[in-house]
Amino acid sequence: MRQSWINRDSPIPLYYQIKLHFKQQMEAGMLHPGDRLPTEMELCEQYDISRSPVRQAFTDLAREGYVYRRAGLGTFVAQTAPARLAEQIRVQILLHYDAPWIDALENAVLQWNAAHPDKEVNLDLQMCSLPNFHQELQRRVALGDAPDIVPMDYVWLFDYVQAGYLAPFETTQPGSFNELLDDLEPPVAAQNVIDGELYGLPFHADITGLWYRHDWFVAEGLEPPKTWEAWLALIDHFTCKKTKNRLGYQYATAFPVGSKAGEVTVNFLFPFLWSAGATLDDKQTIELTSPTVYKALRFLRKITLDPDRRACLPTDMGEMGWWQIPRLLAEGRVPMLLGGTYELPFIRQKSQWQSVEQLTRHLKFISIPQPSVDDSPVGSLGGTSWTVLQQSPVADISHELLKLTVAPEILYRFCEENLQISPYHSVNQKLMDMSYPWFMMIIPLLATARLRPLVRNYPQMSRFLQEMFFQVLWKGSPLEETVERTARSLALL
């Protein structure tokens, strides 16, 4: 096998890496009109890859007019390919882990180029690890080399808007996004419309809750927990060695409690504070020293600090990254855990449940347990939006491209294939009308969604909260003292 330009650890699909490689070679003059590309079999043997991504890459290149095929002879660079690539408008996109969206972007580019042959665009995808994403984005803005398009979690939007990084979508064509605005689910609109202007074009939405192994619960004659006490009772049930041996799992439950899981820790644990009655003040800051916050944290400490229950949690739970926790569920090592609907594609990839029927037979997802049956369910809203940078010299084209990516038919297909909630009411209604069991289970949970604080310096606030949860829930630090210290730190932001 040759030294490869293929990165198997990249979230960019293999077919797209192959396609991008040959387009870059044409643009750089390393491949000329009429040059023959390696055969599918040659590429498979040279780089130890399967034929499917190679075939898809060649099919896409031919469909887009960069290559042509001759039966029995091979695949050749089209006469116009290098000149077309040289004349195309480059649109830079800085991505972290949301590579499933590449197909939607590619479809948007195809539509745009077909309708605007005099203004064709070429996507320049640039990858960055998630932990370094914000630092890299801010560095490039400071240097005047900002990307044009960036996918951004809802919770970060407010901070970047207030800092002047993002361009509103109504700037270039006033009123052109009104129909999309009217179709946004209300909690999603609240996170993407800031000071009356649309800054994020949402692509998917998610909600936090509790995953559980439906097949195991049925086998044990158990009901999913609706209250805190019911959840404790189930944890105690699954600490039993006989039950462990019978079902073959390792841990009773799991959830993020530290900074290694990043914002996921705050996202998953905030609903416990809300359900206990915690509120935000006029400055969108949670009143940490209120009795309701202490009530929620004392409950969670019953799970993490009680010796018997602690013994049935992963020993490294406080150091786990966000991706390590849903992997436990996918591998059959835990009967239930806190999570988010966005994790299902990852769980599906890491498990043996590939069909939707298998997934819904083994897994269910419900609201996070509440203090009592009289309390209303609460979940934390999440999701990702496309944004356009103020520095972008092609902001108008970027806005139009992104509008194409959220066309109802494209979003419907994306949500159906990835089993995700849509940010748009019309798409969710269509998914519900099809009576898919999975969507009928998760879409109604949007009604329970609450927003995390919309404040400047939210990343710093989140880091303080992550450390508080880690110290209080995992290290066993004094509750009141640690919470009060965190409240004083937040007051300085």
Image: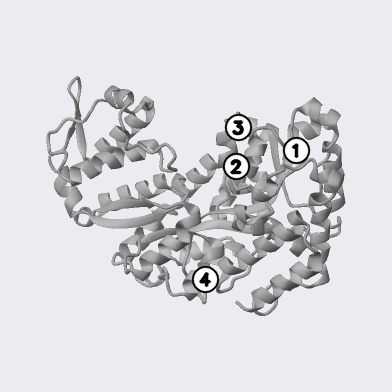
Evaluate whether residue 133 shows in this view. yes
How far is the residue under mark 1 from the one under mark 2?
20 Å
Against 492, residue 221 (above or below) is above
The mark found on residue 251 in the picture is 1
How far is the residue under mark 3 from the one under mark 1?
17 Å
Instruction: Identify the image quadrant of residue 399.
Output: bottom left
* Total number of numbered discs in the rendering: 4
Query: In the depicted view, which residue is nearer to us: 20 or 301?
Result: 301
Q: Give the amino acid at mark 3.
A: Ser
The mark found on residue 44 in the picture is none
Q: Give the amino acid at mark 4.
A: Asp
Task: Label 2, secondary structure: give it.
Answer: helix
Evaluate whether residue 444 shows in this view. no
Task: Label 3, secondary structure: give it.
Answer: loop
The mark found on residue 344 in the picture is 2
The mark found on residue 351 in the picture is 3
The mark found on residue 159 in the picture is 4
Find residue 451 and report its horizontal and vertical position in percent: 64, 65
